[in-house]
Image: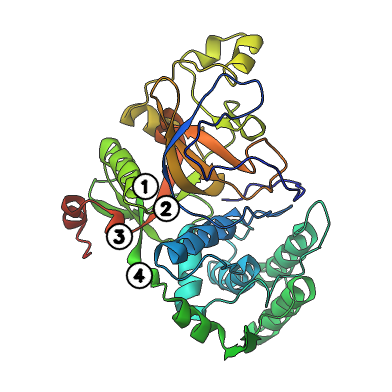
Amino acid sequence: MTKHFILAALACSFTYMSAQDKSNKKNSEYKFTVTKNIEATSVKNQGKTGTCWTFSSLSFFESELIRMGKGKDFDLSEMFVVRTAYPLKAENYVRMHGKAQFAEGGEFHDVAYVLKNYGMVPTAVYNGSFQNGAKAPYDHKVMDSVLAGQLKQVVDPKNEVIQPAEWRGQFNSTLNTYLGEAPQNFEFKGKKYTPQSYAKELGLNADDYVYITSFTHHPFYQPFVIEIPDNWAWQQAYNIPLDEFMQTMSGAINKGFGIGWAADVSEKYFRFKEGLAIVPEDWASMKDADKDNAFTTPVKQAAINQEIRQAAFDNYETQDDHGMHIVGMAKDQNGAPYYIVKNSWGTDRNECDGYFYASEAYVKYKTISIMVHKKALDPVLAKKLGITQ
């Protein structure tokens, strides 16, 4: 998940924390009624980076802390996760002789792995060189180019062998230059911590979270490694039929659990600026004016099934573009269901405070995978998957 955007972090007046009817934009005929809402922390801005996977994951975990009764003022450090994960990616890349992915992107399980094995810190303690007041508060373009260049030198067989201690030292020095050195000890709100002790106090158990998908090129009810470039750690997701997948998503929300959502956002019927992600039934044959009108007037959505979904994944139409956080559900004036999605592109790019509505058809069609708490699963499904709740 590596979507890049240049964003500003200005405040808007729109909010989803109400049962009142809402719309996606001014003068739109869409009228949404929130049917279930999951409390969430403020919308963040990933800037000019491909770090959506850590922004969405930590938003998800912050909502989990709220659900667990831990409080509402958590702001976990996305850049601590990035700083911790990069050396792991580099190690994998070198061991694979440069035949593995080394890039900004990652997956939800990368964040859970860092939480479990390296701990966590608040953003107030480590912000990774946040550029306060800048349009792009984070910009990793130069850093990523330097890091990739260093690793290419390591794996290039034409070059002199570089000893592990040497390249690792150079790599970490570059990370420290651009992000700052991650703290080993820190004080926060009058208490002394290590990242591990802070994570323990949070009470989040990384093993409580599962990853689920729905594709036909692997058996259902079995885990498999999703074949996407940013799954550099080759972690597995449970595979279930599409109908059960959608039931799992709506069931989790209705039980009060949020969802980490990995999806394709490259389609022309995904329009964050308009606050909508939809799949109009006749999109390919629609005139441009009718396509624009589809974002102000509700239209019939395409009927998405397992075969259509699989074909889009197989032909690269659906790719692993972006990680987001689903925080609720709504229905439009015609009763059609939508998911309420919290993004990490700041708050000034649409009239929805950085959120948007994704239709059920869009979610069916363009989802790569989800992260949920295992207790959000239907017990019958959990049993099928061999998951102890």
Nearest to N terminus: mark 4 or mark 1:
4
Q: CA distance from mark 4 to mark 3?
A: 9 Å
| Residue displayed at 71% across by 39% down | 349
- Give the labeled residue for mark 3: 374
| Label 1 Cα crowd, 10 Å radius (few <14 / some 14-19 / many 20+) | many
Which of 258 and 365 lies nearest the eye of the viewer? Answer: 258
Nearest to N terminus: mark 4 or mark 3:
4
Question: At label 1, which amino acid type do we have?
Answer: Ile
Q: Tell me: residue 109, above or below residue 163.
A: above
Secondary element under disc 4, as helix, strand or loop, is helix
Question: At label 2, which amino acid type do we have?
Answer: Gly
| Residue displayed at 61% across by 21% down | 28
Nearest to N terminus: mark 2 or mark 4:
4
Question: At label 4, which amino acid type do we have?
Answer: Asp
| Residue displayed at 52% across by 55% down | 40
- Give the labeled residue for mark 1: 253
Nearest to N terminus: mark 2 or mark 3:
2
The answer to whether marks 2 and 3 mark residues whose Cβ atoms lie closer than 8 Å is: no
Secondary element under disc 2, as helix, strand or loop, is loop
Task: Give residue 207's mark.
Answer: 4
| Label 4 Cα crowd, 10 Å radius (few <14 / some 14-19 / many 20+) | few
Question: At label 3, which amino acid type do we have?
Answer: Lys
The answer to which image quadrant residue 159 occupies is bottom right
Which of 322 and 319 lies nearest the eye of the viewer? Answer: 322
Q: Position of residue 46 (x, y in %)?
A: 68, 55
